[in-house]
């Protein structure tokens, strides 16, 4: 189901910025989370 995949992607996209911000705060603060989420989504 595309809805399930979309929900799973949303949950992953929500948690990714927090993990990135915790792992690399210096890189996560100046860069907005939206491009990062789109980049991760397109790569995977």
Image (cartoon, rainbow, N blue to C red):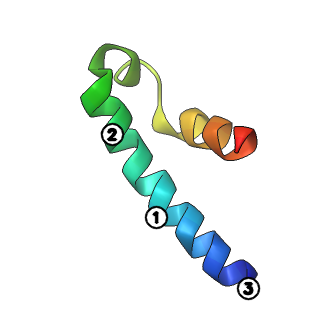
Instruction: Check contact, mark 3 vs mark 2: CB within 8 A.
Output: no
Contact between marks 2 and 1 (CB within 8 A): the answer is no
**Quadrant in which the C terminus is drawn:** top right
Left or right of 42, for residue 4: left
* Labelled disc at residue 11: 1
At numbered mark 2, what does the secondary structure look like: helix, strand or loop?
A: helix
Horizontal relation, residue 30 to residue 3: left or right? left
Look at the picture and state if 25 lies above or below 17.
above
Q: Give the quadrant of residue 14.
A: bottom left
* Left or right of residue 21: residue 2: right
Q: Earlier in the sequence, mark 3 or mark 2?
A: 3
Residue corresponding to mark 3: 1
Q: Residues within 10 Å of mark 3 (few under 14, many from 20)?
A: few
The CA span between labels 2 and 1 is: 13 Å
- Height in image: 7 above or below 26? below
Q: CA distance from mark 3 to mark 2?
A: 27 Å
Q: Is residue 13 above or below residue 31?
A: below
Q: In terms of sequence position, does the residue under pointer 3 or pointer 1 come before the other? A: 3
Q: Secondary structure beneath disc 3?
A: loop
Side (left or right) of 43 relative to 8: right
> Mark 2 Cα within 10 Å, few/some/many (few <14, many 20+)?
few
In the rendered structure, find residue 19 and report the number of the disc placed on it.
2
Q: Answer with mark 2 or mark 1, whichever residue precedes in sequence.
A: 1
Where is residue 1 drawn, in percent x and y?
A: 73, 85
Image coords of residue 23 (percent x, y): 29, 26
């Amino acid at each position: 189901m595309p809805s399930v995949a979309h929900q799973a992607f949303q949950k992953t996209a929500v948690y990714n910025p927090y993990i990135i911000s915790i792992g690399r705060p210096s890189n996560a603060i100046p860069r907005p989370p939206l491009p990062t989420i789109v980049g991760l989504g397109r790569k995977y």
